[in-house]
Image (cartoon, rainbow, N blue to C red):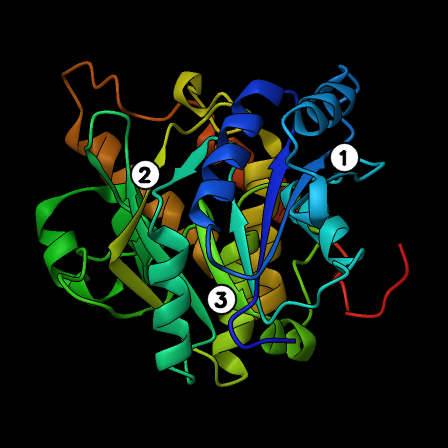
Amino acid sequence: MSVGTVHVIILNWRSAQMSLRAAKAAITAMDGIDGVVSLVDNDSGDGSFEEMSQHAADRGWTEGGRLRVLQSGHNGGFGAGNNAALRVPPDRPCDLVLFVNSDAFLEPDTIARMRTHMLTHPDIGLLGCRVLGEHGNHHTTHFRFPSAAGELEDAARTGPISRLLARHVVTLPMPPVAAPVDWAAGAALMIRSDVLNSIGGFDEAYFLYFEETDLCLRAAKAGWPTHYLPDASVMHIGSVSTGMREWTLPPDYWFASREHYYRKNHGRPYAVVAMLAHLAGLTIRRLRALGRDDQTLPRGQARALIRHALAPSRPRQIFRPGDRP
């Protein structure tokens, strides 16, 4: 294995044309870099796998093993789909893995910049990059780990509480230069294979959301911090597969992932404290909205939090290198 080989993984679910666009950008960004791009269909059941396979073959992307199209065989969510690619190692072993969303398009120099940063900073375990919208607007993808205090601040959304709990606000200001963060969003997230070998891949108990937060936390506990590199960027459309832009309330799997994160990493009593902190924040926010129609107030969120707090715990399902498909 040559130094700095890269395995790019792009997960598709019922968005074949978008995923092919992401794959094309990744292939361009891999120019001059040894490695492979894996385009994984997460059991879409809509002909995506066949469409992507045919498109890749027609354009010669699969020649020489530069790109491969895989089928996960089961839609277990974001983490499970990416783990499916890790379970089928490339013919050329790679020492860096880059997870890329199907609606994220790498700039031509993004992989090279991220790869260089990882090679020159061997103590870093994971690396996120700057994420921009279609019109060049900055997407916040650099965060602190969630906490009960952060739940209170986020739900209340009031100046005095935000100032009091400033050190717990989950969203961090964008670092002007490469710097450590607690976790970075998975639109384009690079991780060392050595870290994956040490801590395992994604926990498949998360269907969607919080899986990259959990991965960064497990790496940090093992001595591998996450950094954010603003000099490398990706254009991200967002919400193509999830429909997040139309949400009035997050779906059940978001609340289930949140609850699993707290219970797994901090214990069930702390998860209860985090829920109560969030409910307290919502109460403060509603009191502030008395007498006026606040359309931003979430409807049904308190009930969803309580319902999932009463649900049984989910078993951890962490992929380990060497696990068979």
Q: Spatial distance from mark 2 to mark 1, Cα to Cα?
A: 34 Å
Q: Which residue is mark 3?
A: 216
Of 312 and 8, nearer the camera is 8
Q: Mark 2 touching mark 1, by CB under 8 A?
A: no
**How packed is label 3: few (under 14 Cα within 10 Å), some, or many (20 or more)?**
many
Q: Which residue is mark 1?
A: 75
Question: What residue do we see at 18% from left, 55% from top?
Answer: 174
Q: Which residue is mark 2?
A: 282
Tell me if 110 is positioned left or right of 61 in this view: left
**How packed is label 2: few (under 14 Cα within 10 Å), some, or many (20 or more)?**
many
The amino acid type of the residue labelled 3 equals Cys
Image location (x, y in percent) of residue 17? 57, 19
Image location (x, y in percent) of residue 101? 51, 39
The amino acid type of the residue labelled 1 equals Asn
Question: What residue do we see at 76% from left, 34% from top?
Answer: 75
Q: Secondary structure at mark 3?
A: helix
Q: Earlier in the sequence, mark 2 or mark 1?
A: 1
Q: Earlier in the sequence, mark 1 or mark 3?
A: 1
Q: Is residue 184 something that shows in the picture? A: no
Q: Secondary structure at mark 2?
A: helix
Tell me if 147 is positioned left or right of 175 in this view: right
Residue 267 in which image quadrant: bottom right
Residue 172 in which image quadrant: bottom left
**How packed is label 1: few (under 14 Cα within 10 Å), some, or many (20 or more)?**
some
Residue 107 in which image quadrant: top left
Residue 259 sits above or below residue 134 on the image = below
Question: What residue do we see at 85% from left, 36% from top?
Answer: 73
Residue 291 sits above or below residue 169 on the image = above
The N terminus lies in quadrant: bottom right
The C terminus lies in quadrant: bottom right
The amino acid type of the residue labelled 2 equals Leu
